[in-house]
Image (cartoon, rainbow, N blue to C red):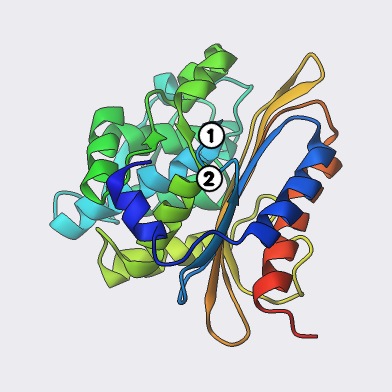
Amino acid sequence: MPLALALWLAFAPPDAALEARFEMVARQARGRVGAAAELMESRQWSAYRGVDRFPLESVAALPIAMAILSEVDRGTLTIQERVRVLPADLVPPEIQSPLRDLRPHGSEASIGELLEYAIRQGDGTASDVLLRLAGGPESVTAFLRGIGLQDIAIEVDEGAIGRNGPQAYRNWATPESALALLGGLQSGRGLSLESRSLLLRLMSTSSTSTHRIPGLLPAGLPVAHKDGTSETAHGVTRATNDVGIVTLPDGRHLAIAVFVSDSPAGEDVREGVIAKIARAAWEHWFNPR
């Protein structure tokens, strides 16, 4: 475990009882599951397979967006700046892209619009254009290392994954490093207050899956999250993911990261595993009963 992450987690030992609940739920996926959760204000935390590597899929858009917004904060980019989206930028049909579907011959969009497509709609084309604007995988990696995160890798774009699915395993994170990424976002590490607020707002109004982290939480509970999903090949789904921050009724914040990988289970089961793990963490630390 990297030193920065070890120090971050050292405020309290992991919660073994909650880990046992995570493990029990994880069995339902019949694949690899990794999960981590933290009650942010008190640094209470737990993890199951917390240092294993899992493919990110479009969760990768979150660190890419953070790297872009750090450049906005530095003044090298602006939210209003318009960018050409060329036909060569459009991801293959295997990758979700409302922007490609709406404008199949290319288009022009502001950086703010690209962020909205990538974060709110899981758009692979928008994510790839933002990755290019950020300076490519090396620059996003440098941003992550600069805020103390080691166990997250962004090596390929969505287009490459669409052309060769196994390439997706080159973009990975551990559940504990995803938790640390959420902690960095919540605390504004590497981002201005304005950029942090913008990203959390986009994550809070995501139009993709509501059946994962928010699925079994009380209605109306604020959840800022970014999910990611692969295609299913030969009856196995490479990745069904969600990472996010839940604002509890008492104002505290619960960070959750769940990765379901290489699972033959149906989508309802895979999403249900994520929802049940989120519910277990909420009950364990908030428990209104």
Residue wearing tag 1:
52
Q: Position of residue 165 (x, y in %)?
A: 58, 16
Q: Residue at x 80, y 85 (%)?
A: 289
Q: Residue at x 72, y 53 (%)?
A: 20
Q: Position of residue 14 (x, y in %)?
A: 54, 59
State whether residue 114 appears in this view. Answer: no
Residue 128 in which image quadrant:
top left
Q: Do labels 2 and 1 touch, CB within 8 Å?
A: yes
In the figure, 148 relative to 234: above or below? below
Judged left or right of residue 204, residue 214 is right
Q: Amino acid at mark 1?
A: Asp
Distance from the alpha carbon under mark 2 to that under mark 1: 7 Å
Q: Is 39 in front, or is 239?
A: 39
Q: Earlier in the sequence, mark 2 or mark 1?
A: 1
Q: Which mark is residue 163?
A: none
Q: Position of residue 106 (x, y in %)?
A: 44, 29
In the figure, 4 relative to 153: above or below? below
User: For the image shown, how many numbered marks are present on the structure?
Assistant: 2
Q: Amino acid at mark 2?
A: Pro
Residue wearing tag 2:
175
Q: Position of residue 22 (x, y in %)?
A: 71, 51
